[in-house]
Amino acid sequence: MMYWMPKFRNASPWILPNPVPSDTFLLAKLAIERIMSVDTRAKVTVYDSADIPDAIDDTWIVSGISEAQRGLIATHPKEMSIYVEGGFRIWLRDQSIVYYILRSDPDPEKEYVQEDPDDLRNLIDPFLIPDLFELKKKERSVHEQEDGIILAVAATGTSSQDSLLSWVRALEKDGNPRLGEVPILFTMKSPLGKTEGNGEIESAPLSSLKQRVGGDRNRSREEIDSNEKKTIR
């Protein structure tokens, strides 16, 4: 056990500090870095809504976007809408944070290659075909899923629609001018139903759960003792 337990503890590729910080800003940075780790070229940026014109909420914005996602935004058709969806909850040990995504519908006109990379029959000598990369169909990136294309991820201090609007404006100002030419729809929907904002998240939900479970156990023991006394009488 002394040999395996440290290995299990360090098995996760996303190392977290112990204990996990309870500050929502630090949690947001850890969460967005974990989510964006699927792309090695991803970059996490912190924005201040006070730097955005006409912003109402004064809060921080932790945004994650990669070069591949910037390219997807630049080539996004102007007539297709982009959606801001969430919140989605991610747990970091006993702490959680709510994040939002910038998503677009998949382009039905795009054709992607679907090949088995382990199939040796798909090997082609690039020296025999000079225009190999032009003839081959584009491969699907990790951000292009069947149900939608993830363009960016963010978490804000207030989780309000105004803070998310400031996030979109910050992305537009930070090298994504196409966002100002495309209709942005704030659906604010989540498969989890209604979710709390990051300012309303409990700092230690597991501790309260343990207290509640412990109280239920004590209560059940008291009921058992009282029932035994009644039967003895």
Image (tube, rainbow, N blue to C red):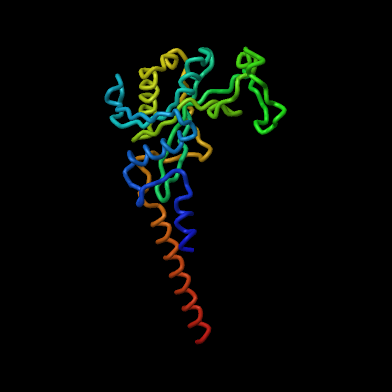
Give the side of residue 47 with respect to residue 121, left or right.
left
In the picture, residue 14 is in which quadrant?
Answer: top left
Q: Is residue 74 left or right of residue 146?
A: left
Number of numbered callouts drawn: 0
**Residue nearest the observer in this picture, 134 or 139:** 134
76 with respect to 163 (left or right) = right
Q: Is residue 61 left or right of residue 36?
A: left
Q: Position of residue 170 (x, y in %)?
A: 36, 22
Question: What residue is rendered at 38% in x and 40% in y?
Answer: 30
Residue at x-position 31% and y-position 32%: 60
7, above or below 56, in the image: below
Q: Position of residue 185 (x, y in %)?
A: 47, 22
For this orientation, the residue located farthest to the right is 121
Viewer-nearest residue: 201 or 113: 113
Residue at the (46%, 20%) spot, across then down: 70
Camera-side residue: 113 or 201? 113
Image coords of residue 10 (percent x, y): 45, 51
Where residue 111 sits, quadrant-wise, is top right
Task: Residue lying at the far front in this picture: please name it.
Answer: 127
In this rendering, the answer to whether 45 lies above or below 2 is above
**Where is residue 42 shown, x and y percent of the image?**
43, 29
* Residue located at (56% from left, 23% from top): 105
